[in-house]
């Protein structure tokens, strides 16, 4: 049976501000990417989310982002490679400590937002992120956009990697995601999203916005948890995947 990991960004509430439906969505995914306080999240939210992930037997991952609470980590900030190394080390280390104190095990790391997007195409930035992850724990799995530089950097330093695809995003013919600034960036129809994921798993292809099929490796699929219908979307996509005889399980 074919297998896919389903991951979702979690723990992105901050103080009194609530974002996402973490508690409701966790039973329907296999991996949680938990914000570490730079783009979203705070220490109490991190601990709460870690506890929920452990209770639901969901693999725990750190979700480090740029120091940009106001812009949710989606704005451009210039970073030297050594600065990127430091902010990733700081955030991954913080979540690692919380996970250890709760008796859990951290499994993976996935960069967030602009840090993720830039690393996809920037070898130096990707190398800094990969080295930071490896130096904390060489057994961690590094997630990154399928075909991106971050996966190459992870493999180069000796990390296991997870080639990530997106259920609710459209693609460009160079294999990158359509910018969120474009009106056609998001897929809101769960059936259409499920069909896209199944084809990526079964055929290793996704149709770009330009109408061209792009080769793609799907090892983990991202389901965003902050939309107005996120819970219903996650349920439908998982149901469709499993009905296609594809097992949902964390990357081992």
Image (cartoon, grey):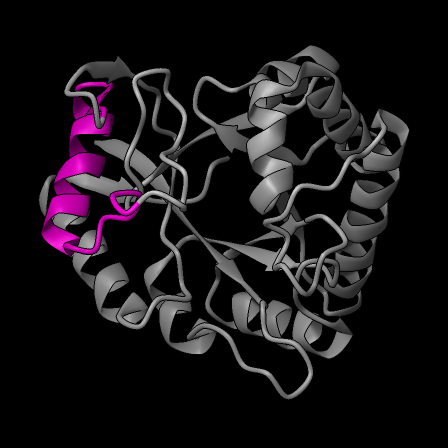
Query: Could you tell me if residue 229 is visible in this image?
Result: yes
Residue at 40% over, 63% down: 225
In magenta segment, residue 177: no
Q: Is residue 22 above or below residue 187?
A: below
Q: How many marks?
A: 0
Q: Which residue is at a point 20% across and 53% down the rendered structure image?
A: 237
- Residue at 39%, 32% (x, y): give it: 177
The part of the image, by quadrant, that contains residue 235 is bottom left
Is residue 201 located in the magenta-colored stretch of the structure? yes
Residue 20 location, x and y as percent? 45, 72
Residue at 53% from the left image edge and 31% from the top image edge: 144
Along the viewing direction, whichever of 215 and 157 lies nearer the viewer? 215
For the N terminus, the quadrant is top left
State whether residue 186 is above or below residue 44: above
Q: Is residue 93 above or below residue 99?
A: above
Query: In the visual, does 219 lie left or right of 86?
Result: left
**Magenta segment boundaries in residue numbering:** 183-208
The image shows residue 23 at horizontal and vertical percentages of 45, 77
Q: Position of residue 230 (x, y in %)?
A: 31, 66
Q: Nearer the viewer, residue 182 or 53?
A: 182
Q: Position of residue 175 (x, y in %)?
A: 37, 20
Q: Is residue 206 left or right of residue 23?
A: left
């Amino acid at each position: 049976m074919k297998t896919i990991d389903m991951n979702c960004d979690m723990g992105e509430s901050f103080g009194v501000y609530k974002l996402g439906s973490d508690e409701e969505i966790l039973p329907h995914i296999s991996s949680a990417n938990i914000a570490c306080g730079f783009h979203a999240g705070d220490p109490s939210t991190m601990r709460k989310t870690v506890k929920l992930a452990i209770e639901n037997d969901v693999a725990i991952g750190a979700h480090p982002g740029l120091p940009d609470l106001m812009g949710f980590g989606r704005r451009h900030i210039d970073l030297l490679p050594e600065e990127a190394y430091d902010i990733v080390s700081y955030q991954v280390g913080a979540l690692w400590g919380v996970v250890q104190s709760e008796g859990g095990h951290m499994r993976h790391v996935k960069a967030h937002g602009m840090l993720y997007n830039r690393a996809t195409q920037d070898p130096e930035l990707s190398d800094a992120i990969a080295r930071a992850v490896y130096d904390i724990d060489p057994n961690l799995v590094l997630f990154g956009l399928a075909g991106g530089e971050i996966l190459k950097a992870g493999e180069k330093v000796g990390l296991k990697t997870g080639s990530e695809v997106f259920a609710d995003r459209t693609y460009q013919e160079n294999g990158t995601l359509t910018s969120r600034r474009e009106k056609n960036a998001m897929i809101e129809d769960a059936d259409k999203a499920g069909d896209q994921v199944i084809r990526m798993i079964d055929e290793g292809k996704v149709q770009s916005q330009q109408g061209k099929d792009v080769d793609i490796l799907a090892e983990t699929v991202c389901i965003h948890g902050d939309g107005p219908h996120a819970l219903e979307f996650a349920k439908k996509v998982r149901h469709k995947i499993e009905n296609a005889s594809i097992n949902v399980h964390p990357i081992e």
